[in-house]
Amino acid sequence: MELLNNLALGFGVALTLNNLFYCLIGCLLGTLIGVLPGIGPIATIAMLLPATFVLPPVSALIMLAGIYYGAQYGGSTTSILVNLPGEVSSVVTCLDGYQMARQGNAGKALGVAALGSFFAGTVATFLIAGFAPPLAELALKFGPADYFSLMVLGLIAAVVLAHGSIIKAIAMIILGLLLGLVGTDVNSGVARYSFGLPELIDGVGIGTIAMGMFGFSEIIRNLEQGENREVFVKNVTGLWPNWKDIKQCTWPVIRGTALGSFLGILPGGGPVLGSFSAYTLEKKMAKDPSRFGKGAIEGVAAPESANNAAAQTSFIPLLTLGIPSNPTMALMIGAMIIHGIQPGPQIMTAKPELFWGMIASMWVGNLMLVVLNLPLIGMWVKLLTVKYDYLFPAILIFCCIGVYSISNAWMDVLLAALFGFIGYVFIKLECEPAPLLLGFVLGPMMEENLRRALLLSRGSIEVFYTRPISLTLLIISAGLLLMVAAPSIAKKREEAFQEG
Amino acid sequence: MKIGHPKDFWGGVCFAAIGLLFLVIARGVPGLSFLPGYTMGTPARMGPAFFPFWLGTILFLIGLWIAIQGIRTKGGEAGKLEKWHWKPLLTVLASIVAFGLLLKIIGMLLSGIVLVVGASFGSHEFKLKPTLILAVFLVIFSALVFVVGLKLPIPLCPDIESLQTMPVCRG
């Protein structure tokens, strides 16, 4: 009963005219940038942070969340029609989606992707509603030492589940933690690593880093690669799958949703991992795996359901523990802090209208996306014909204005350019920038909890292994690290990311 | 000596250098007045230097480890450094920097045009006329959305008093 009451409260917030409007804006913007290759939700949310200053926090977060899951819907459109992923999480959709389009089944592929995503979104919404409260309650029992260990686990898991070299990802996390410490130390008032620049006394903004490393360096990379796009839009008709398709897709959608929901909750999981794993799973379960890559409808249904489910369940650690599971969630934490909300387990009790309003809005947003997107596909297709030469200056100017507006500081624009350069160097050295952003958000929190834990224990590190919660979390972290260090599992992990 | 995996090697060198930078600044260098260092404190009473010093040390060691592994392992083709494309890198970054430096002085309308035209030099086929049209369209659109619509305090016109009183410039 309590759940229903809570959901009623949430829908009461989400269904106000104002919030419906911002949810719609978020979903539309999300689809737009999802469709467009070369700009993702991270840069967009960073760009729009200053625009949300005038909004009440609930509306702001509803809109920003809409951008994130809206992008999952949009990304599939580009994958299917252009064979180019609009978002990383739609990479695998290219494999079978584009083949379906070439066989004249573009409409069916788009329809299945949208309906599967909607199903996944609905399930994930209820999962959040069901799982978040007990998790938040548990988290309220956490002491500083437990919190510190939880963050260690979160960061380790993020590394293990991300692709690429593990040791490099750990280095990126530590670099992120260090960057997060720039600025005034709350306990002593000392301005650390500010090099005498007044702009750095408050630290580097998360928007600045995100824009530089995910917006600017992405643009530079796209420019050096040149473009090669072929829009496949001969006949986008027959969006509704027939009975046979539905029967064929039911289990893949359910499996994709389950897998995606689970992987979304894990730190470092999220949509990308969800869609890759769901595709691999379907291929393994299929009676005739050779159909995959040649237009198998399950190859669209499962990963598209999984990425949407994962995009939504990744809000669970954010809303209950205050810990981001992926870079977009790190930005959401930044947005919460800007709006004066301290992320953590107390949100649910202190601000129930925000907590449940956001959850309810996700379901509303998913409904909007299905209803709006399918008819709008013609418009998205037109957008895809815009050349990147005209697109990137637009992205660039919005990014620059966004960076400047976060605190009206021109210095931030220069800093973002610097991070754009750093991001480019790291891309060239094959170091993923995503863990850095996670570390950046957690840096100050980790230091604070470590400080408190050691203060309470009078400097003894025993506290980390005598408290049962902390000990369990640390054992899981160590286990994870040992697991990926084992050669056989390391190989499996490589395979999961190389599928296709 | 031949480096087997240049990508890892240089990645490790970067991490080690950054780690070293952070730990040295935290600890300070005796005798250098611009590097006084922060208070270390004890574990029970951590000073501002404590956490960054240890993190910097760990990063330095991990960087060193990656670099050494980079020398020893044979990376083959995958380990080779990718070619750098200086043109898009420099044009885009320089335009962003120019935008940041010029914004307060000549306003968003003009610096936005500088940004768009400058960055477009980096693209494959640059044509002045369509780029200029695009630039004008984008700055007007941005002014309408961000300054008129969202009321963000962004200077639009050059910083000359007579211009500032014009209604156009205040959004």
Image (cartoon, coloured by chain):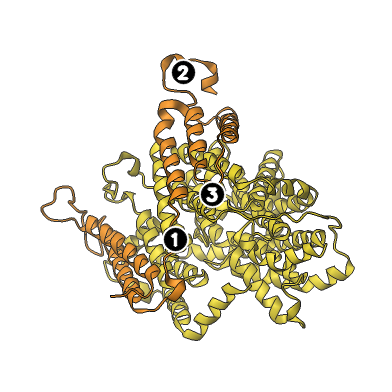
Chain colours: A yellow, B orange
Local secondary structure at mark 2: helix
- Identity, as a three-letter code, of the amino acid under mark 2: Gln
Disc 2 target residue: B164
Q: Position of residue B51 (x, y in %)?
A: 30, 61
Q: CA distance from mark 2 to mark 3?
A: 32 Å
Mark positioned earlier in the residue sequence (2 or 1): 1
Q: Is residue A143 visible?
A: no
Where A495 sits versus A348, above or below?
below
Q: Dot 1 falls on which chain? A: B
Q: Tell me: A161 left or right of A68.
A: left
Q: Dot 2 falls on which chain? A: B
The label on residue B83 is 1
Q: CA distance from mark 2 to mark 1?
A: 47 Å
10 Å neighbourhood of mark 3: few (<14), some, or many (≥20)?
A: many
Q: A343 or A212, which is in the foreground? A: A212
Quadrant housing the C terminus of chain B:
top right
Comparing marks 3 and 1, which lies closer to the viewer? 1
Q: Tell me: B61 left or right of B92.
A: left
Q: Are marks 3 and 1 in contact (CB under 8 Å)?
A: no
Where A469 sits versus B94, above or below?
below
Identified at 47% across, 31% down, the residue is B111
Q: Position of residue A302 (x, y in %)?
A: 72, 69
Q: Position of residue A142 (x, y in %)?
A: 45, 65
